[in-house]
Image (cartoon, rainbow, N blue to C red):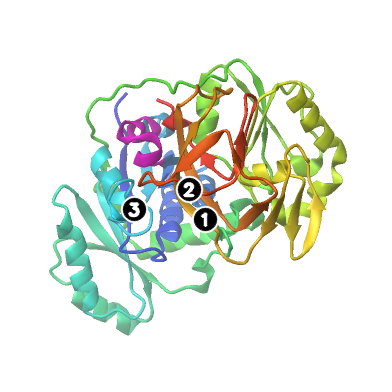
Amino acid sequence: MTPVKGLVIAAPFSGSGKTIISCGLIKALASKGFEVAPFKVGPDYIDPSYLAQAAGHPCYNLDSWMTSQEGVKRSFGRGSKKAQLAVIEGVMGLFDGAGGTTCASTAEVAKLLGLPVLLVFPARSFGHTARALVEGLISYWEELDFIGIIVNGVASPKHERLLKKVFQGLEIPILGMISQEKKLELPSRHLGLIQAEEINLEEKLEFLSEKITRETNISEIISRLKRASFSPFQNNPPAIKLKGQKIAVAKDKAFSFCYQENLDILKEAGNEIIFFSPLEGEIPKEAEAIYLPGGYPELFAETLSRHTALHQKIKRLADDGRPILAECGGFMFLLEGIEVNGKSFPMVGLLPGLARLEKRLQAIGYREAIFEGANFLVDEGQPLRGHEFRYSLAKGIGLEGMKVKDFEGHEVSTFGVARKNIIASYLHFHLGSLV
């Protein structure tokens, strides 16, 4: 299969407007009739929902720490099978990776895939310092190919004239000047952006598409796209043990933080995916296994607490030895309760303990779990990588059946259990790490 043409959208730091520009460009390209494959660098699971809606196709994460460098190529191949173009939104600043390194950075992904970089620079109150920052970025790694720069958040015609003067004679061309616009702002909450399905995103995407088409040289951007170019790799399927099962996967406003590739990998192992909504209180009768991804159960705690029949069905499936994978919000749902603003709501009660939402961030970072016994996913001692990002604490439960380490190999204090048929913790696993 010939790799698709594409680009990587990068920025000097977070908050520069990568998601807005990526969504707008994807929507504009789709409006021109292109089948666009959206991607997101790093472990984020909220931005991909915006990119997916803009493209009309699932968004895949590209993360070299969770899945390895070879895994990035496999992920790109999975996500771009039927596409004509690929647009990859970067993570944080261009060279920002895990633990102060460039591992899992936007720059590393661009280099691995051999794709050019479109730099988004936030104008804000910048003057000539912008030139110094951009020149530093484009010269830091000679291996990177920059096709141009989009200046985002231009305050006025005078500011635009100033910035054009600042960037005059730059090694790469200005391909867009995006003016400040209140409509460009995306709402957020404690874990990041509001989920795409919670807002009228389509109207905003149409506006973004028109603005990108009007304020960038989109035809020039298209002409500068290049085909992905990377060395051959072993396309070995992940060694997942769960096979031939009908898996009920929770999917609604309370549970939506699931890597698309996890679903692909489960299907490739011969499993059937059946989506259900815990908020509706039902679980498929034919379910032989349950996957409860992360999300915002704390926002819907009262509704979830009322579905006692669902709670009992989940406990019966667990008692029958059926596999249950629960990540972060899914783990919280399996506990005895969730406490929000001092009020406790009863949950499934499969596991002891209470999850309490705190005002401050409690944990964030890459994680590697090593299991102390065999279970339905992996063998004893086999590592499984993922990410942890939470504002809650679990009381009355510790860490059972696994050890968890961070990117640097230091043991991490967290919560969860790993048993023969239950894996439930605050970790969001990426099954692409099972190679």
Res 247 → quadrant: top right
Q: State the SS at label 2.
A: loop
The percent coordinates of residue 96 (x first, y second) are 31, 56
Position of residue 247 relative to residue 204, above or below, is above
Res 315 → quadrant: top right
Q: State the SS at label 3.
A: helix
Left or right: 231 in relation to 276:
left
Q: Alpha carbon of mark 2 to alpha carbon of mark 1: how far?
A: 10 Å
Magenta portion: prevailing SS class: helix
Do the CB atoms of the residues marked 1 and 3 lie less than 8 Å apart? no
Q: Which residue is mark 1?
A: 363
Q: Nearer the viewer, residue 49 or 282?
A: 282
Position of residue 41 relative to residue 125, above or below, is above
Mark toward the start of the polypeptide (1 vs 3): 3
418 drawn magenta: no
Q: Which label was assigned to residue 279?
A: none
The N terminus - image quarter: top left
Range of magenta residues: 62-75
Q: Amino acid at mark 2?
A: Val
Left or right: 25 in relation to 259:
left
Seen at 27% across and 55% down, the residue is 95
The percent coordinates of residue 339 (x first, y second) are 74, 57
Q: Amino acid at mark 1?
A: Ala
Q: Which residue is mark 2?
A: 412
Left or right: 417 in relation to 307:
left
Q: How many marks?
A: 3
The percent coordinates of residue 176 (x first, y second) are 31, 64
